[in-house]
Amino acid sequence: MDAILLQILNGLDKGSAYALIALGLTLIFGTLGVVNFAHGALFMIGAFCAVVLSRLLSFSHTIIDETRTDFLGNPLKVEVPYLHEWLGEGLGQTVIEWSVPLAILFSIPIMFAVGYAMERGLIRHFYKRPHADQILVTFGLAIVLQEIVKYFFGANPIQTPAPPAFAGSFDFGALVGLDPNTIIYPYWRLIYFSFAVLIIGAVFAFLRFTTFGMVVRAGMADRETVGLLGIDIDKRFTLMFALAACVAGLAGVMYAPINAPNYHMGMDFLVLSFVVVVVGGMGSLAGAVLAGFLLGILESIASLSWVIDYLPGINQIVIYLVAIIILLTRPRGLMGRKGVMED
Amino acid sequence: MTFSKTNIGRRGLIKGGVALGAGLAAPTFFNNRSFAAAHSGYLNAPTGKSVTLGFNVPQSGPYADEGADELRAYKLAVEHLNGTGSDNGMMETFSSKALKGNGILGKKVEYVTGDTQTKSDAARASAKSMIEKDGAVMITGGSSSGVAVAVQALCQETGIIFMAGLTHSNDTTGKDRKANGFRHFFNSYMSGAALAPVLANAYGKDRKAYHLTADYNWGYTTEEAVTQATEGMGWETVNAVKTPLTQTDFSSYIAPVLQSGADVLVLNHYGGNMVNSLTNAVQFGLRDKEVNGKNFEIVVPLYSRLMAKGAGANVKGIFGSTNWHWSLSDEGSKAFVQSFGKKYGFPPSQAAHTCYVQTMLYADACERAGTFNPCGVVEALEGFEFDGLGNGKTLYRAEDHQCFKDVLVVKGKENPESDFDLLEVVEVTPVDQVMYSPDHPQMGGEEATLGSCNVGA
């Protein structure tokens, strides 16, 4: 029982990432009718926003320490971050250590611009083309973005730790009266989960309670009529694309301390996120979120060692297995609407 | 009479001259013939003034950084072999003095490169293309055991020498050993044998270990080697769980570790897997826990500096093993670090080191054999003892084509002084302690054989 509870907790943070990416995917699909295979790359770019900010904040100049030598026997070059000099060593270091939370602010304009440029520059030319073309062009774009990141940052993962205040884990088991050490949960993953809930709530509130959101929802239901009413729906849909890019980017920024960012992380999440969208139901925002958490938790439970002993390999296929079962029993997914992708 | 005598004498003189000329010319003539014989009758025998080597490294994919470092080392080795570098690197310290800095057997060394993508099929395809299209006479490289085993088998089939780069699985020179293949890098068995005593010494003999193992060839042999070696020291293995190679978040595998009652976590992971699993383990605060009245510990059997860099501060105090480290102070290592450091501005990785050494060993074997013929090279390398290449006295064992040398046990440094200064050598395990018989069960037992060398043509 403890083990299951532990894996449910564990599934929450991965589920959060799935839910955030799938939410953006569904948003884009629902508004623009585009299957965006570059969405995983947006998640990856978000994570690299955290890397870039942490590098910018630790921007240094070199001083030569004559008392020590480097590996070739020359005087040692020591890198001193400018922030240490400007703000003092203590405060400067603290700012550097807080680069991941600070990157949230840093990444919003960047992701918005990337999303906007992507939609205006490339994707809008593919609205009237078949889905296969859209998939090919966005998948190609994803590979290009990935290779650009690899060119500048290398193939190895880059550690981007959370602020020391959030390092380590707390004993969840002891809090709910179980034996100590049975259920431990890292602070940062709890923060990630809370952050995801906050973002998901904000997106839903935005769509539900603002005029802009209302128009977008109306456009999702019947694009033509909204256009006939004299509303420039395309412009709003472009902004929704940028918003979806921001959601994926923020998911990436906050994920950086959980798994060191590498150029490939977008692809790792992309396929699963598509499964999440399909299981949740194409075009259903609530379905995407629900399916995200559900599959995250199932994946965690399937990797318990006694589960693997009974069903070897289940940890690698559980998500797809569930997808097959759901599509067989509910062809539109958990919360799919009639008419989406059925024309 | 006199005339006739003189006449005969003159004829005799002419005959004698011809005979003498032929006699004088004979050694060169025969040498030329034997040279021609030595340089034909095998695949891709170099006929011009140059010889082509094929460097098959991961230039894309998850091990691309390691591959890039391997390629740097190969280029440096080629410079040294051709005598065009700013120094001669380890050629100066190498115990064999057959290399002269004029290429190999007087032929200028040229190279072609291929991208393995860390995928067996891609690696075979690029090796095949270098052999068939570019006429490479030797293939070297690899940053994965799956790739090494696949390319080694290809080289055996086609009749080309394969000098393995970074590959640590027992199988490369164990059950999948091949007559045309050679490995300088150490292996899983050696890691286990070197680590176990150090671990028992540091953490005690009453420990319960939990293994997380990458679900492929290298993971299995490493898990087996470390499990057997630590159990031999009195440790108990509580559980061993296979993790998918494509896994990025290991939390669902790490969270149950504490529940199992284990007090040591062994991460049989490499590359990105290792960076992520170690980061996750540290996030879960495993190292701050106390289990069974002891501090919880983590062990990483195979370390690399490039990986340690990826894992950042998480490696501090964690034991592992490595084939070579730039901080070693023997003359060979110093010469290599100087040479590589001057050219590239940072110290070489263990992957770079083993690739450089393999190229030197191949070139030296050709010189000593007087041919590029694979069977001649095999004969020259089998049982070859050498020194001065950074690992002390080393033997290329004839039975399995594995190098036997001291093994380094390292630990993540507590207070690193630079980006490179991440590991410290805590013990140099003598070669006798990591030696095993060629038919050891972990190495494929009695059934594992090299077969016979293949010259291809």
Image (spheres, grey):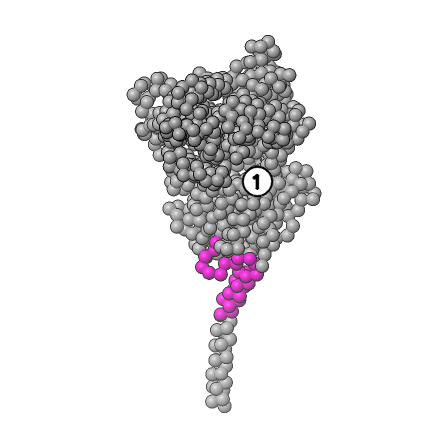
Residue drawn where x is 60% and y is 34% of the image: B215
Looking at the rendered structure, the kind of residue marked 1 is Ser
**Residue B325 colored magenta?**
no
Q: Is residue A67 visible?
A: no
Horizontal side, residue B234 vs residue A221: left or right: right
Question: x, y percentage for residue B443?
Answer: 65, 40
Q: Which residue occupies the foreground of this view, B181 or A97?
A: A97
Q: Is residue A140 above or below residue A15?
A: below
Q: Which residues are magenta?
A: B25-52
Q: Which part of the image, by quadrant, shows the C terminus of chain B?
A: bottom right
Question: x, y percentage for residue B27?
Answer: 51, 66
- Please identify the residue farthest to the left as the structure is shown: A86
**Residue B43 colored magenta?**
yes
Residue drawn where x is 66% and y is 37% of the image: B442
Question: x, y percentage for residue A18?
Answer: 51, 26
Q: Secondary structure at mark 1?
A: helix
Q: Which residue occupies the foreground of this view, B42 or B37?
A: B42
> How many numbered marks are there?
1
- Please identify the residue farthest to the right as the structure is shown: B446
Query: Which residue in the protein does label 1 denote?
Result: B145
Give the chain of mark 1: B
Residue drawn where x is 54% and y is 27% of the image: A337
Task: Classify 10 Å Cα crowding around label 1: few (below 14), some (14-19), many (20 and above).
Answer: many
Residue B446 figure quarter = top right
Question: x, y percentage for residue A247?
Answer: 44, 25
Q: Is residue A75 visible?
A: yes
Residue A184 figure quarter = top right
Residue drawn where x is 50% and y is 73% of the image: B22
Q: Which residue occupies the foreground of this view, B396 or A262?
A: A262
